Amino acid sequence: MPLPAFTASISRRLAMLCGVAAVAACASAPPMDAASVISKAEAAMGGTTLATLRFAGSGTGGIFGQAYTAGDAWPKTNISSFARMVDYPNAGMRQDTALSRAEPNGGGAVPLMGQGEQRATAMLQGVHAWNMVGPAPTASPVALDARIHDLWTTPHGVLKAALKNKATVATRVLDGKSYTALSFTEPGRFEATAYLNADNLVERVDSRQSSPVMGDVDSVITYSAYKDHGGVKFPSRMTQVQGGSLVLDLQITEVQPNVTPSMAAPELVRQFAERVVAEKVADGVWHLVGGSHNSVLIEMKDHLVLVETPLYDGRSAAVLAEAKKLVPGKPIRFVVNSHHHFDHSGGLRTAVAEGATLITNGPAKAWFDKALANPNRINPDALARSGRSATVEGVAARRSLTDGQRTVEIMEIVGSVHAKGFLMVYLPNEKLLIQADAYTPAAPNTPPPAQPNGNHVVLVQNIEQNKLNVERILPLHGRVVPLSELMTAVGRK
């Protein structure tokens, strides 16, 4: 039944007044204070007195930066065990993992499909990152930014980082759900926004960090199914997508608050500095070693060719400096990238900043064009500071460089499960073969394996199919060896 005109008029006026009052109330409401928001969240999550924590579980993941084809998803893994210990007061972290391949193709140090697990221990303390290889610590400066990110994007860590870095606070809506968002920057390391749900629990962390290869790279971490562990609330599931592809999907089954940490950086790690040792293997050819990844410098008549600039700016800057010292006055005109995996391409931005043309595999050219044009705003690298643009050439199957005296043959390793478009470099006059992960020599006098490594077998097949007269192999991991060592490793004398 319709309302009388007078009653309807009063109702409309009351509605308008209520609307005006609501707007006035909103306008006069004090802005949210980030410190208060963080204090409530820490209380809700039991983090007020939390200093250290260990969590463990199992799940699946992907090997970041190790796609079979440049631009594809990261190779899938099965994670049989995962444990991360964090020490917030001392900015420390220890992560122990055991993982195996869930698909045959792609890179990383994980054994080939069906041939076992990789067990790894990754460490962080302050501004030092290292790996434990058995009982021995090995500095890993390339991993520093990523480990700092992992420490301070844990559910409780992100609140502590937000408070330290004077986060801003706002209300945001994601997928139709309202969150309190805390945004901050860890200077020179990463930017992040933590999303708190109605229960003041950290449900998601969006971040952006620096990649030596990709420039700015985005990450999305989600936390769900919180449970109470002695007064500390922690998620039972954690997922992370980095660079657009899954790197972690973890079911957490064990949480231990306030455990005793043990992660002080050893003196060997604290004193680490990049070191490049030049081993002359022929006139105008040097094997540049001194770290986990090698490079090879080749002198041409009026320029230089550098095979591989690995890891990150720090390593490649040292390699470039050694090249200039060995052959002063000649520019590095070409840098040859064996394949697109991030440990082998992490210094390309450094080489491009020097004006070198990048030669890489054909399938990766378009991806590198895009990646090298991507800015690095979090921590500007050599390329960002240079203002240069990259020149990239792709090798379809074979490419020759010559100055009329020396010839450098660049060709694909066909049939590899490690990387699509995997390249090797052959110097016919010197009978030298340069290659990366297809073969890493074992220690001297090591007996051949009972089952030959498939990557080794494929390399031998490619040497024979291309009729290459190889006397010595210059590996991009390990020592120079005669071809006979490779043949022994595959069961042939």
Image: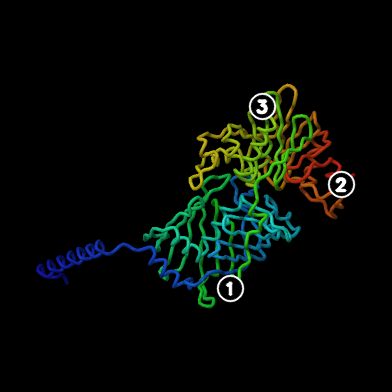
Please, is residue 266 above or below residue 388 in the view?
A: below
- Say left or right for 198 vs 56: left
Please, is residue 187 above or below residue 13 in the view?
A: above
Q: Which mark is residue 380?
A: none
**Res. 287 image quadrant:** top right
Residue 361 in view: no
| SS at circle 2 | helix
- Which mark is first along the chain, 1 or 2? 1
Spatial CA distance of label 3 from label 1 is 58 Å
**Res. 258 image quadrant:** bottom right
Q: Amino acid at mark 1?
A: Gln
Q: Residue furthest bottom?
A: 230
| Quarter the C terminus occupies | top right
Q: Are marks 2 and 1 in contact (CB under 8 Å)?
A: no
- Say left or right for 161 vs 94: left
- Which mark is first along the chain, 3 or 2? 3
**Residue located beneath label 1 in the image:** 256
Spatial CA distance of label 2 from label 3 is 37 Å
**Residue located beneath label 3 in the image:** 303
- Which mark is first along the chain, 1 or 3? 1
Task: From the top left corner, tell me how far across and down residue 474 is, in percent.
Answer: 77, 39
- Say left or right for 150 vs 111: left
Q: Which colour scheme appears in the figure?
A: rainbow
Q: Which mark is residue 488?
A: 2
Please, is residue 55 above or below residue 339 in the view?
A: below
Residue 459 in view: yes
Q: Amino acid at mark 3?
A: His
Task: From the top left corner, tell me how far across and down residue 378 is, in percent.
Answer: 49, 48
Spatial CA distance of label 2 from label 1 is 49 Å
- Crowd tier of the residue under label 1, counting other residues whose Cα lies within 10 Å: few below 14, some 14–19, many 20 or above: some
Count up the numbered dots: 3
